[in-house]
Image (cartoon, helix red, strand yellow):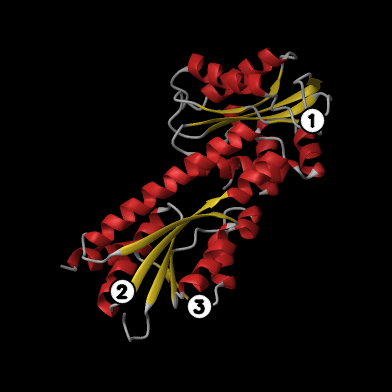
Amino acid sequence: MRISGLLSEKTISRLTRTDKQGVIEELLDLAMNSGQVHDREEALRAILAREALMSTGLEKGIAVPHAKTRAVSEITMALGVSEGGVDFHSADGKPSYIFFFLLAPENAAGPNVQVLAQIARLTHDRSFCEDLRKAESPAGMLAVINDAE
Amino acid sequence: MSQGPVRKILLFVDGSEECITAAQYAVVLARTLGAELAALYVVNVSVLNELFKARIFIKMEQMDYEHDLEQDGRRYLNYISELGRAKGVSIETHIEKGVVNEVVVEKARILGADLLAMGELEPIKSRSDAFHDESELILRKAHCSVLVVKDADYIERLYQAME
């Protein structure tokens, strides 16, 4: 499953917000650019409900905010990179820099799992994460993912 | 039971369109050859464990997805049973959990399948796919002959023409 096929230059950006709620909303707005999110409020509610259970801030500067929601009928992704890092209440207590944001319809368990597994595999590679942070534009970030895949 | 070259076919069901084509062909073969037909769906719990270990999933989410995948599997198997029933072929269905390729290969051995049928392999879209494609691993590890079913239009005609 290629995640580069689920992203476009419209759904990738450097992040400007520096707080957790603000970053989530900024990522959601990026995801809205795909034209696949029917209901912004419902999508936001689903993401925040998942974050309330436990932060999706992982280790090594990666966060994967995700949720199943009726707000989309196809798997919808966005990617944000923060220059200075965000306190996302991550597992290692360190700031998060790279955010893979994923909304999945409720009836797509199989594909959703495959996408998340691909994110886990890619972000396991330190040089991939460094290249992503260094990329200067959405096109550059997309190229980094394409190359890694 | 058939005394012919194929006595028991195991169909690997992964929920793809390709596996539906494989199911149609397996039904045609089973009826034509007088072979028994079984279908197997495997809940990929290894990928769910991988996501839990990576901290992407919490335990509750892992269990929720496992339940969803199992429900999906039951739905696929019910649909395939109907494909068989419509042509007078009884299909024994199995749902298991584990590492997909390992479970399929082992189940084929336990059931005494002499032919494993599956859908056309998806094109390799990423380097990761090359390492994680379960169908390809099954193809390599199976102890019996493996039939990779292609040409959906031809198979559809063949299946529909069978009275």
What's the distance in space between the residues labelled 1 and 3, CA to CA?
46 Å
Q: x, y percentage for residue B42? A: 50, 55
Judge depth for marks 2 and 1 and give the one in front: 2
Q: Secondary structure at mark 1?
A: loop
Local crowd size for mark 3, using a 10 Å CA cut-off: few (<14), some (14–19), many (≥20): some
Residue B66: x %, y % from top left? 54, 42
The label on residue B29 is 2
Q: Residue furthest left?
A: B163
What is the quadrant of residue B91 in the picture? bottom left
Kindly report the distance in space between the C-alpha atoms of the residues bearing marks 2 and 3: 16 Å
What residue is pinned by disc 3? B144
| Image position, residue A149 (x, y; %) | 66, 49
Q: Nearer the viewer, residue A3 or B163?
A: B163
The reply to whether callout 2 and callout 3 are in contact (CB within 8 Å) is no
Q: Residue at x 70, y 20 (%)?
A: A15
Q: Chain of mark 2?
A: B
**Sequence-wise first label, 2 or 3:** 2
Circle 3 — which element? Answer: loop
Between A83 and A121, the one nearer to me in the picture: A121
